[in-house]
Image: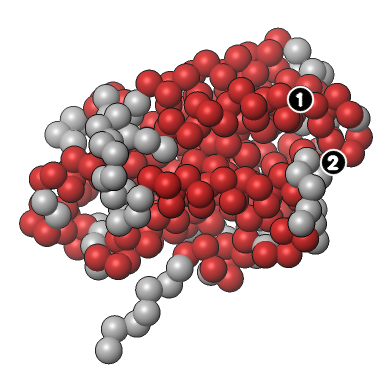
Amino acid sequence: MSEPVIRRTERADFVASSDPALQASADRGEVNLLSYRELYHLWERQQWSVQDIDFSRDRVDWHERISPDERFQRMYGLSSFFVGEQRVTAELGPMMRAAPTEDMRIFLATQIADEGRHVAFFDRFYSEVGIFEAEGVQERLAEAEAQVNPSFYELFDEMLRERVDRLASEPEDLEALVEAVTIYHMVLEGMLALTGQHFIIAYNEEQGTLPGFVEGFSNVARDEHRHVAFGSRFLREMAERDERYRTAISRTLEKVAPVAEQVLRPHWYEEGMPLFGYSLGEVRAFALKALERRLKAIGLVAVS
């Protein structure tokens, strides 16, 4: 008898991050967020290597088991992650320099390393599985960019970059940092990335496909939960510190969340079409529930 599918969002190493979305007690406003130093120590214990992953089965699956139509659909999610990881790696530097304490800066330095490793993971997957014919990471990124929808670029290249550019010129602008963390950690990583990872990993496990990818992508998701835990703690502290920061979080979410929801909808999507075995409504509900728990932990949503 085969082993039951492991629901990756219930894994102990994910829960260890203290991401509020993985704590049912967050619905009651009872969360235990790790300190910045504890998150750094967790990063040290959760290291992994892109070069250790075996993609030999994945190459066979991609070219022989997965149909051309399904490969086309899968490309949207895979390409969004590949391009997204590259984008955020470039934006983290000003955020790290603007962080007001050394413990925050130390943790954000680990996140820069994580995001670079994620780009390397996707690039090796695309290259060794033979998904793109292009040679070189820049060329493969260019091919991946053609797969994502316009809302993706609005979110990354306009909304996030505008805040990061403000921080680059005025690193003491804490309101800009609050807005950037809201977009980056709550929306890009929390609402979009971890939602996609949940469904993509579960679908591949259920189908028995791409085992090397699942191993590496699970490591990426573990990193993302740790990053989101940092963002939750930072935003809670800032919301408690000054009402204008609480207002900045709410204002930013009101502008960004509708665009983020469109990123969940592939440009080729037709009403009723399943996404990795689930409806678009189920995917959105998962994303919004996770966001709600994190906002309760921050103190922006009343607890039930």
Quadrant including the N terminus: bottom left
Nearer the observer, 298 or 90 = 298
* Image vertical order of residue 298 relative to residue 13, above or below: above
The residue under the point 30% across, 61% down is: 204
Q: CA distance from mark 2 to mark 1?
A: 13 Å
Query: Which residue has dot 2 on it?
Result: 237
Query: Which residue has dot 1 on it?
Result: 248
* Image vertical order of residue 121 relative to residue 187, above or below: below
The residue under the point 25% across, 67% down is: 208
Identify the element where label 1 is drawn. Answer: helix
* Residue at the outermost right position: 241
The residue under the point 18% across, 36% down is: 132
The residue under the point 62% across, 64% down is: 15
Quarter-of-image position of residue 75 = top left
Q: Which percent across, then down, holds residue 86?
A: 44, 31
Identify the element where label 2 is drawn. Answer: helix
Give the foreground label among 2 and 1: 1
Nearer the observer, 19 or 283 = 283
Q: Which percent across, then down, holds residue 117?
A: 46, 44
Q: Amino acid at mark 1?
A: Ala
Quarter-of-image position of residue 33 = bottom right
The mark tally for this picture is 2
